[in-house]
Image (cartoon, coloured by chain):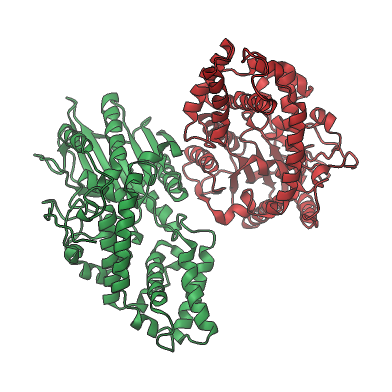
Chain colours: A red, B green
Amino acid sequence: MRRFITSIIVAAAAVVAIAGTSQEEIAARLTRSASNHTIYPETNLPALTPAPAGYEAFYIDHYGRHGSRWLTRQSSYQRPVDVLMKGHNDGLLTEQGERLLVTLRQILAASMNRAGELSDKGAEQHQRIAERMYNNFPSVFTDGAVVDARSTVVIRCILSMQNATMTLRKLNPNLRITTDASYHDMYYLGYGHGEDTLANHISDEIYRHTNEMYEENVHPERFVKQLYTVPDSLPMPVAQRLMRDVFDIAGSLQGHHAFDNIDLFHLFTGDEIFELWRMRNIDWYTRRANSPMNGNRMPFITRALVRDFLDKADAAVASGEHGAALRFGHGTIVLPLACMLELDNVNLSTTDLDNLHNVWKCYDIIPKACNVQLVFYRNAAGDVLVKALFNEHEATLPVATDMAPYYHWKDLRAYYEKKLATEIDWSAHAE
Amino acid sequence: MRRFITSIIVAAAAVVAIAGTSQEEIAARLTRSASNHTIYPETNLPALTPAPAGYEAFYIDHYGRHGSRWLTRQSSYQRPVDVLMKGHNDGLLTEQGERLLVTLRQILAASMNRAGELSDKGAEQHQRIAERMYNNFPSVFTDGAVVDARSTVVIRCILSMQNATMTLRKLNPNLRITTDASYHDMYYLGYGHGEDTLANHISDEIYRHTNEMYEENVHPERFVKQLYTVPDSLPMPVAQRLMRDVFDIAGSLQGHHAFDNIDLFHLFTGDEIFELWRMRNIDWYTRRANSPMNGNRMPFITRALVRDFLDKADAAVASGEHGAALRFGHGTIVLPLACMLELDNVNLSTTDLDNLHNVWKCYDIIPKACNVQLVFYRNAAGDVLVKALFNEHEATLPVATDMAPYYHWKDLRAYYEKKLATEIDWSAHAE
């Protein structure tokens, strides 16, 4: 794969999250190393800027990822158990290895028939997000307000919708809430049914590259040595896979109350944890974000979704009604959507992958239940402003404004309309 | 297939629905001919018998089918359009045939990407059932009452749950409602994951028989003649399939507000409608109910579900709490469940299929949103009674009682426990 040459375009926007290097941030909270498995960061959320005088929120355009879930493949739990069980049967495990096997078998048993499903914490994340949305914007959720909730056909998303709408219903029983989850809406809500299908080959090409990166950079010798009495018990690919599998499970445990007292990060050094995260960060960036490696095309897989945002906002502005369009889906959509909308610096374009971890951190961008809220305000004269929340932080938007974090809807709308018209050559290969 | 010899066992229980022959009932309301596509019959529901003095309802054990839906296969809408389109292109359609093609294409367009999904009326059915459940048994749904709602993993069931629980939440925001839809629960909630898998061969064998019945008894000549200018335009199997497909669509239209003004029954004579229903009635009875043809075994595919009913009832009785276990699934489960529980005369066993339509009518048993509610009552002394509602009609149960429609839980529980222990030889062929 040839090296890509593209100028680095770093948005001047505010940094998404708290200051600090990713090394420091991960050391301070190891769960961040889980990348997209990081639980929704909802403590210490910043206060929101009051609406400008005379303006009141009336509509929210939303897309949210499902909450914490079980790993999507049963094999992710099964495979490391199988490997260690063989070591156990051959008498090759250390005491630490035996303890790990016991723990992994316990997790495997709990995971049976749960692959990919929403967890208890995932349900709670959506209850709390909905509660804060209601409390932040009570003027949106007035009696009779229309809440049009839609989900992809994937169960964890439907149950996320269920938890969100049940919470809104409790807070105001007089909302007019409708819910749906249909293949009919998948072309804009989901993955694999719309423009993204044209981009599959790009994702596949980059995957081959990031997979090579893992093969070159995962060094499992120390990790395996603590588990096996005989060095070189495992062929390199098996050892690498075991280390990665245990790391994935370690990161996923934070999504379940039942595993609150289980820690598997202690099997890894700080450097190993950071390096495993750094590679995943590059993988997410190059495959799903505004990376030159994908030809800066991936954000455009959400074109139909942004179209839906604009159309529903237009209808809300025109109708004069109050309400919200809530959409429940996946991180593979939230990431390119945040790029497409140019929230904060998520849309960063850089070829310098060695420095990526200093400027773009996936744990802030696509944790579980990550979400975009475009909040619409109007005044008595009918002027419309919009504010963006990304994971409930006020985000910068790609047009000028004299009243940040509020933007003039007419300017933003025009900017997005122009961007939506961009022609994309999906047939070209990845860089 | 040899003729089965089994004594006719007609339960002495009350007849499920209003008196009248099925011919009369279908003529009075053609939508009943749609069998399991019949909308939930919720007008003129009978008043419920007040609780005996000193007893109060505290718990409901429930299983409900999803509400009205789109036909499960896109091909059900597509196939008749393809056949008629060919007739159109060949210039063979009558004016009536052309009109039917226009109508079917309109329905096909509306159905795109909706196969199997819950309809608008289906959602409303579950809202109303939940509202009546709440109003019928307010002492169950007190502040803090636990509502444990579970669905199969099929979206129309999840959205049925969503509509039911959202309604309960509105009626009492202080219910403690949890929802789930997981493969973890499919062995008792769903089809194809539990004991029923042992019965697949039986269902398949009977299907071959009922299919032959259709081949012998569907006479499409008159039906086709009104659509095609040239008699014998269609080979017999195609003509039969067309007649059955149009009949299925005719029956399904009642599930959608958008089709309230479309009628396709006018293409059939009363006798044809009755005969097409009668065969479907035999099909449902022999494949899924307590028919000697399946060895009176099919009810037992719900053994794990009845086990769950008993276990959760035991827990509710023991805990002293208020609440409900709500389960959302399929008609293929409600029917054998109603047989297993021996509600009214649903569990009828008869070899006289020529007379079946006079004693067992599927439109009363498994319409859309059909449901079973076992309602538990207790008095200050801790004595527990139970009442069964089947499609919201008080139903008889298979033990003696001195206070019908209330039964002593201890007697009923013992009866079901004994029945659950029945050994079934799933390997034997169908009769």
**Left or right of residue A363, residue B422 in this image:** left
Instruction: Establish if A98 lies above or below A303.
Output: above
The residue closer to the viewer here, A105 or A196, is: A105
Depth check, front residue: B101 or A9: B101
Q: Which quarter of the figure is the N terminus of chain B placed in?
A: bottom left
Q: Quadrant of residue B43?
A: bottom left
Q: Residue at x 31, y 38 (%)?
A: B304
A108 vs B32, nearest the viewer: A108
Total number of numbered discs in the rendering:
0
What x and y, as percent, mark residue A229?
62, 12
Q: Is residue B377 left or right of residue B234?
A: left
The percent position of residue A27, horizontal first and vertical second, equals 72, 17
| Residue B59 visible to the viewer | no
**Residue B183 occupies quadrant:** top left
Image location of residue B35, percent across then percent down: 31, 62
Residue B412 visible to an observer of this rendering:
yes
Q: Say if A57 sits above or below B46 in the image.
A: above
Q: Is residue A104 left or right of residue A349?
A: left
Residue B416: x, y in percent?
Answer: 20, 37
